[in-house]
Amino acid sequence: MFVLPCSTGQRLAASTLRSGTTHQWQALRITSLQHQWSTPIPHARSLQTEATQVSHVPFRKQLKDEAKRKRDAQRLDAVRGNTQDTCKNSNDSSSKKWKLTVGLEVHAQLNTERKLFSDAMTSEDCAPNAHVAVFDLAFPGTQPEFQKATLLPALRAALSLDCEIRQRSQFDRKHYYYQDQPAGYQITQYYSPFAVSGNVHVYDHDGIAPEDGRIVNLAIKQIQMEQDTAKSNLQPPSTTLLDFNRVGHPLIEIITHPQIHHPQTAAACVRKIQSILQAVNAVTKGMELGGLRADVNVSVSPQGSEALGQRTEIKNLNSFKAVEHAITAERDRQIAILESGGSIEGETRGWTLGSTETEKLRGKEGEVDYRYMPDPDIAPLIIGQDLIDHIDRTLPKRPDEIIANLMTVCELTMKDAKSLMSLDNGERLDYFDTVRTMWASEKNDPISAPRLSKIVGNWVLHELGGLLNAANVPFSPTIVPPRSMVSILQNLDAKKITGSTAKKLLAMSFDGDERNVNTIIDQANLGLRHLSREEYIMMAQALLDKDPKKVEQIQKGKQLGKLKFFVGQMMRQGSGTIEAQKAEAVLKELLGLK
Amino acid sequence: MSLLRRAETCFANQQVNKLLNAFVCPRDEGTLISEHTSNLRDADKRRDRGTSIKESLGKAYLIALIGTPKSAIDGCLIAVKDNICTSEEPTTCASAILKGFHSPYPATVVEKLKHAGALIAGKTNLDEFGMGYTQDGGSLSAGGSSGGSAVAVATGQCDAALGTDTGGSVRLPAAYTGIIGFKPSYGMVSRWGIVAYANSLDTIGILAKDSSMARNIFDAVEGFDSRDPTSIPVSTRSRIAQQLLERKAKQGWGDTPSVRIGVPREYNTAELQPEVRRAWLETLQGLRNQGHTIHMLSLATTKMALSAYYVIAPAEASSNLAKYDGVRYGNKNSASERADNVLFASTRGAGLGEEVKRRILLGSYSLSAAAIDNYFKTAQKVRRLVQRDFNNAFALSHPLLKRQDGSGSEPKVDVILTPTAQSLPPRHSSLKNKASIDSYSVDFLTVPASLAGIPALSLPVSIAGQDGIDQNAPTSVGIQVIAQYGDEEMVFAMARSIESLRDIKQLS
């Protein structure tokens, strides 16, 4: 390991450097090798445990944000309805006169074993500079060696975004100076990217702005492969340490057409792109862990005008919230300038979380001329149609397909389907599937399958989810073994136990009780003893007699909610032998209610 | 003479010629002797045993014991241009920005030389990063940029040397110093470990006293290298070999089959010095006498080639040299950053020389958004035309290209013969007053073969001296032999034919 202080050049020991070992020249013709590619695609390698803990946060947060947004909107409507708040409306009417247009550039780190142009491993959690080949450090005399396997996740990404794959593409050098860019240029695909003309559908349930209606079709202009940079580690006041593990890590840059008109929709689009890339296992990790970054192009133009206004670019946004807020702030800034008679400068701007305004990074006069040049060392990339076909055939299901399946086949609500899909890196969904199929195959009754799936969905998501939240532990498919879950639900569905017993059994299994569920039911005598109708009536009458005041409230005051009180009393007294519906029916009968 | 004795002569010559500045870090005789003597003795033993074993078959065990010579260059002392990475010595490209830089790995060609038993004589001087022509060759310029390698060979400081050739950097100094300078087809010799000047043009070059030595070194260093993405793969190499065998079968297996020699009109420029033109004509005459046939032909794009080269090479150089920022290796300027706060500007400003800066600026401009269509892209188109011109001239088809027959009327030739430079080596004093742009035109005759990526060799043809007037007057002119891509065979065959003319002359 070596850490390079930026301030001094330093001789590197040869032992810390590795040069390429396997190389191939000529047009890099890559064809499908059935035996090689047909093995199941592994889950994202890195950060498995960490990712599990963190990756569901944005989704919960999203639900929360959505709820908050609804509340705010209602409140705002209420305010508007009561008082003609002109001050509040001025800004609003301004934005009605102007049309916002946004285009996205999303950079995503591909899930690959090796770097794009050297056979050094990709790794970020290793010691600094542990995985660096001489080429990665731009040593004189070194040459790139395209790692063919990096193309696979790139193709999965492009196909999952409905792109057209170009059989011939090439790599170009994009020149600029920075200490995290060892060669003085980044190798990217400028003149001829490998994928073009894609499309992503973003729905209302994906969180687009209400004004956009049910769906936004966002067209993707192109996707290119390129190198990541090194990581700078600032050590104030004057030292910068450089970690070159990340340098040369393959990225894709997804460039959309400027077709987004609301900040909220822009954030939803980025989130949707991320969820698609994760679903097809193309990327290492999400935005919250630095696996994705977005640049946005923002312009405003008068409503009804065809031409777009002068755009500015906001670089390096690293959360969905940042995307939304930065666009909002930049839109308002541009409108304010235009309304006061000014004009917008084409410039690059930055935005930091928590600020209210974007800040200028460099103006047009400071704009870098990247002097794109085809890399003379790298042969054109030729991608065989057979490889494209194979990747397309074996592409994992995309989020929209999964959600559609969950809603139609399993009869889950949209909200539950989305939760199930996005929780725990897909592990919750796998667990759901395991439990569902186990139960269905034992039941062997295709007609009841959707009903069972719905029950499983409810228990896996809400009952188990509640226990996980209360205990504050991450999900794992072994906490409640699928076998136990199936047994509990089978007993419940057969009315052999009550709902509350089922919950109790789930909690026991969750807490580590490894006994067979049926054994526990027998040993603890939890089975539902069917009381006779007479016994129900006796118990109910006794309770009603004890509390004439409530009876009167129910009968005369029509406070039917109080009925639940008596149902609860019966349940408690019967300790696991009372079925709530029967109890309620008997109570109603005795009270003369229909 | 034993290899050891021959090497000792070289070491002595290194001391005598120190003022010529051929080596970046000249070492004294004692150091050289102690470093190389035991290796040289082993090589001598291998050579002796190799000979004696051939004489007395049956002593196979001796081969196992001592071995036969590792190759034809076993025990040869070979100098290496200082833009080729070696692990023992620093690799500086004669630039302040890389002063003291030790490469963590050696170039493939250096590994291959060592594997063949050759010894590295030292690192030779060059124009910074291979850009320029100003090597000191005494009162006459040795040309560049592999001038250090050329001088070292010409003055007997080593048996041969490696240089690099981007637009003529090996052929021109060879012509000026009266030795052989050979540039193979692009992709035949690995560039892994060669500090890039212009990747699409750079090749390893070989400098030697005669063509058989150059050939032996080429045989030792050529071959596919997986670390060089532009290295020609094994399958293509065997396709080329097959093509050459078929031609040989057609020509017949005689010692000197009659060869069709092309003479391009465009190379007979008005600027050609009379001595050069005379040597060219005499050589053609001699070859015709040997039974070869001469054919005039036209390479129409020759005049555009130089301009295209001076767009493409600086463009690639501006990109390749962007890495020298003093961050990871090399030297960082200790002065604080400049007032305008441009990143790395003071380091690059202090570490890079004038000619290098000039070419970086030139290249940066021709790649800029406003100029790229007019310059870089146009130059690439010219490059295609130059390639097509050559391709249409040769009888052998290009193994990597589809033939695009432009004109069927022109005769097809096996080899093209031209002068290497338009003039005799200029005097050193005259160079100092020359604008750098003027000096670019010395590449006029060498650049086309570089753009086309085809093999070319310069060899000396002696000119009649004006008796005793000037001891320092040049005694030879460089003649350039150019052949189809992959046809190194033809280049060396023609070189031997021309060398035999010289031998005849000397005998008569």
Image: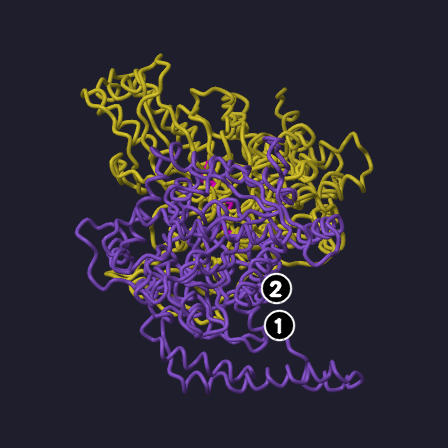
Chain colours: A yellow, B purple
Q: Residue at 68%, 81% (x, y): give it.
A: B50
Q: Can residue B303 be spotted in the picture?
A: yes
Q: Is residue B505 above or below residue A45?
A: below
Near mark 2 (Cα within 10 A), the count class, few <14, some 14-19 or many ≥20, is: some
**In front here: B484 or A317?**
B484
* Of pointers 1 and 2, the one earlier in the residue sequence: 1
Residue A59 sits inside the magenta stretch: yes
For the residues beneath circles 1 and 2, the answer to whether they share a chain is yes
Horizontal arrangement in the rendering, residue B229 relative to residue A336 (left or right): right
Of residues B69 and B95, the one nearer the viewer is: B69
How far apart in space, not on screen, are marks 1 and 2 (Cα)?
Answer: 9 Å
Q: Are marks 1 and 2 in contact (CB under 8 Å)?
A: yes
Magenta stretch holds residue B331: no
Chain to which mark 1 belongs: B
| Image quarter (top left, top right, bottom left or bottom right) of the C terminus of chain B | bottom right
Q: Is residue B333 left or right of residue B504?
A: left
Magenta range is A52-63
What amino acid does circle 2 point to?
Asp
Q: Which residue is mark 1?
A: B72
In the depicted structure, whether residue A492 falls above or below residue B117: above
Residue B370 in the image, given as x and y percentages of width and height: 33, 33
Seen in the picture, residue B128 relative to A94 is either above or below; the reply is below
Per the image, the residue denoted by label 2 is B219
Image-based side of A553 in relation to A366, left or right: right
Q: Quadrant of residue A555?
A: top right
